[in-house]
Image (tube, rainbow, N blue to C red):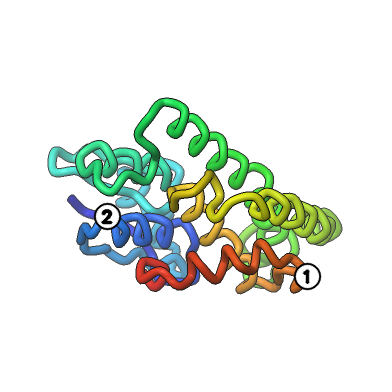
Amino acid sequence: MILYGAPMPAPNPRRVRIFLAEKGIVIPETPIDMMAREHKSDAFLAKNSLGQIPALELDDGTVIAETVSICRYVEEIHPRPPLFGTAAVERAQIDMWIRRVEFVVMTPMRNFWRHAHPRTAKLVTQFPDFGNSNRAIYVDALKWIDLELAERSFVAGAAYTMADICLLSTVDFATWIGLEMPVELASLAAWHGRVSGRASAKA
């Protein structure tokens, strides 16, 4: 298998690296130079028509894109330790929280990055007022997740799962682009300390 990715601070390739580290699996990452636009090259577009990373190319040439899809495939062939749950209700709740993290927390971060950050200004047409309006939306999302984390140790319950990986990669990248976590969100900060202290977080 070939895993196409990019180093920090790229959040989506990091999700897969953290997941693999939690599983104790080594798949060497083939770096794609995003600054040189290698992910938009004809050769890479032939593998993933959206020109996004990460992507996992299987031995038969099949390519799986999208971080959660890649991780679901790995979970199927390496089920232990489970990071998507075991019982039906666990799987459903973890899936629910992955989607909530992506839609509620990641969306305003992504809108700010795309429309208000200087690094993306030369790559896309920006609408800065819209981009900057997402600062407050992102903070509101963190306040909501802080309330949820007051009731449990991890995003989807008592165990560390893919939902935690999704949230960690999101808030760390958000911090890198200038969207800090408010210091008063104690439950979120405690969660961040727990998950950042795991060896996999360094992946």
Residues at marks 1 and 2 touching, judged by CB atoms closer than 8 Å: no
Q: Which amino acid, by three-letter code, is at mark 2?
A: Lys
Secondary structure of the residue carrying numbered label 2: helix
* Position of residue 31 in the picture relative to residue 51 (left or right): left
Instruction: Point out the frontmost of discs 1 and 2.
Output: 1
Image position, residue 39 (x, y; %): 40, 57
Q: Nearer the viewer, residue 103 or 145?
A: 145
Q: Nearer the viewer, residue 34 or 110?
A: 110
The residue identified by callout 1 is 184
Please report the residue visible at 41 percent of the width from the left and 54 percent of the height from the top.
53
Residue 173 seen in the figure: no
Secondary structure of the residue carrying numbered label 1: loop
Q: Compared with residue 5, is residue 73 higher up or lower down, i.e. above or below?
A: above
C-alpha gap between disc 1 and disc 2 = 33 Å
Q: Which amino acid, by three-letter code, is at mark 1?
A: Glu
Mark 1 or 2, nearer chain start: 2
Image position, residue 64 (x, y; %): 32, 40
Image position, residue 78 (x, y; %): 21, 44
* Position of residue 29 in the picture relative to residue 131 (left or right): left
Q: Compared with residue 26, is residue 63 higher up or lower down, i.e. above or below?
A: above
Q: How many marks?
A: 2
- Asked which quadrant contains residue 27, the reply is bottom left
The residue identified by callout 2 is 23
Please report the residue visible at 47 percent of the width from the left and 55 percent of the height from the top.
165
Image position, residue 54 (x, y; %): 38, 53
